[in-house]
Image (cartoon, rainbow, N blue to C red):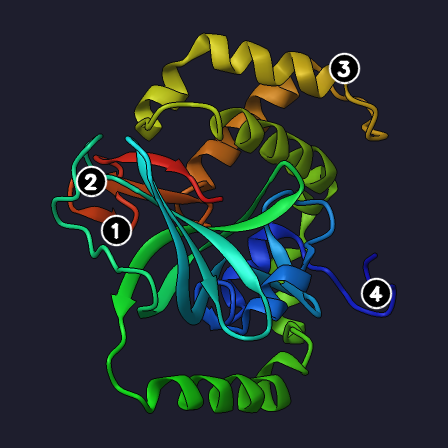
Amino acid sequence: MADSKLVYYPIRFWGLDQLYQAKVKLNVADALSLKEYPGFSGVYSILNHPISNVHLLGDVVSISQKNKFIQYEIDDGTGTIQCYHWRPVEGSDQGMVVPELGNLVSVFGKLSEYNGKRQIRVLNIMMETDPNVEPMHWLEVVQLKRTVYSRAFVLSPGAERFGMGEDSTKEPLRVTVSSILLNILKQHPPFTLTQLRSDMELKERVIREVLSCEDGLKDVDRGLVGEELSTVIGGLAREGLLIRVTEEGVMGPSMEERYEVRE
């Protein structure tokens, strides 16, 4: 349930929040208890901070080797969480850090949910051998909760005026288009932005679903949805909603690379 006293800003302002692009350091219990950001599936919140990336630390208590990924369960004493590390090449561990049972690891990844259970899509995993790492992680989480996570994200008056022009009247439609597109792309193989722009079947599906939804949208037609879809596609990578897929791993945005949706 969203806190009615907090202001949950539109997606175009998220880049101004220091926590949105950060690897947010948490305990497992914190990661399990985060609520979804109002109106956005797969994005979570600390107060009104949109959260995507997290950094957890824990002991590996189970490992399951699959053809496409390695599944870990880590335990930090506050809880356990499943972590999925996708292989760059099916059936190969080349270029991957593969810990063993009992190893202490730092996990950097994307929070997501599958079948009602919170999980981490691993972007990077590091073996930890320094005995000081664990107590330092706990102390840093406590300090961050007191000094950073307890303070709401507030836009400066100048930034808010800049973002609240005539285009703000299209915000409900843009949010709906973005949400529908991202849900479709989660089931989509890696893609380029050029492919998205030229995919007429995808465009028709988004338009059809937007026009059939019941989100209180008014005066919306096919042309307007198509315009908003072009705008949304153009901002996907810029606003941090995609990750770039390469053989070496996950990197930053580039128009020339293949992408998949952050989970």
Callout 3 environment at 10 Å: few (<14), some (14 to 19), or many (20+)? few
Task: Please tell me which of labels 2 and 1 falls first in the chain.
Answer: 2
Q: Is residue 234 above or below residue 156?
A: above
Q: Residue at x 54, y 33 (%)?
A: 182
Task: Please tell me which of labels 4 and 3 falls first in the chain.
Answer: 4
Q: Is residue 239 above or below residue 13?
A: above
**Splitting the image into 4 quarters, where does residue 42 fall?**
top right
Q: Amino acid at mark 4?
A: Asp
Task: Measuring from the top left, give residue 117's x and y in whole percent.
Answer: 62, 46
Q: CA distance from mark 3 to mark 2?
A: 36 Å
Q: Secondary structure at mark 4?
A: loop
Task: Please tell me which of labels 1 and 3 falls first in the chain.
Answer: 3
Q: Amino acid at mark 2?
A: Thr
Task: Measuring from the top left, give residue 200's x and y in whole percent.
Answer: 45, 9
Q: Residue at x 27, y 76 (%)?
A: 128
Q: Secondary structure at mark 3?
A: helix
**Residue with the mark numbered 1:** 251
Quadrant the N terminus occupies: bottom right
Kindly check if marks 4 and 2 are in contact, taking CB atoms under 8 A apart as contact: no
Q: CA distance from mark 1 to mark 4?
A: 34 Å
Q: CA distance from mark 2 to mark 1?
A: 8 Å
